[in-house]
Amino acid sequence: MVMVWRFGAVSVDAVMAVIRDPATFADWMVAVPSPLKAGPSWPETGCVVQRDTGREMRGRHMQNRGLIVAIVDRWRPDRELTVRLRSGLGGWVQIAVRVQPRPGGSLIEVSAEPITAAARLRYAGTGRNAAEQRCALVAERLITLATPEPVDDF
């Protein structure tokens, strides 16, 4: 398992608002293809994120297993999102994002744990450092997206 923490001068509500917005998933989650389409219940437990092929899916073909990129395992609206993410080279990794209030901002904890054997192989040796960098990048992107744009005073 890999775990990193980042502090940002943003509120927990601002970070959770970014996570709640399905349009920003590809912006803060590292190593996912674009464009993506989240299910209508995003980010509720069981919701699926899949590649957007541009074709309208209907009926029993609403989900194509080959297009699934992520599945929400746990959603706690006030502090946590856990997703199963399909690894680019095969296998599944569980990514957990936890947000905690701190004086002057919030602490974002991102952890990654390989679920399948193919993913475990990528986390061995030097792959562990790359996994830590990806987790840190997730937290940093969340902080950037949650930081309000400066307003010019005229």
Image: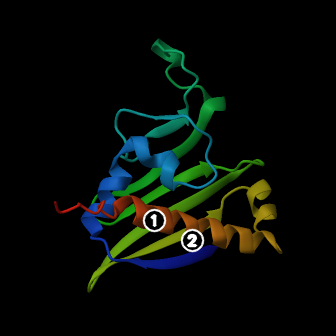
Q: Is residue 87 above or below residue 102?
A: above
Check the image and name the residue furthest to the front: 154
- What residue is shown with label 1? 97
Q: Residue 80 appears in which quarter of the rendering?
A: bottom left
Residue at 53 percent of width and 54 percent of height: 29
Q: Are marks 2 and 1 in contact (CB under 8 Å)?
A: no
Identify the element where label 2 is drawn: helix
* SS at badge 1: strand
Instruction: Name the residue at 59% across, 36% down.
Output: 68
Task: Tell me which corner region of the image, top left, top right, bottom left or bottom right, holds residue 135.
Answer: bottom right
Q: Residue furthest left?
A: 154
In the rendered image, the vertical position of residue 19 relative to residue 35, given as above or below: below
**Residue 140 versus residue 107 in the image, above or below:** above
Residue 76 is situated, as x and y percent measured from the top left of the image, at 32, 60
The answer to whether residue 145 is left or right of residue 50 is: left
Give x and y (percent) for residue 148. 29, 62
| Amino acid of disc 2 | Ala
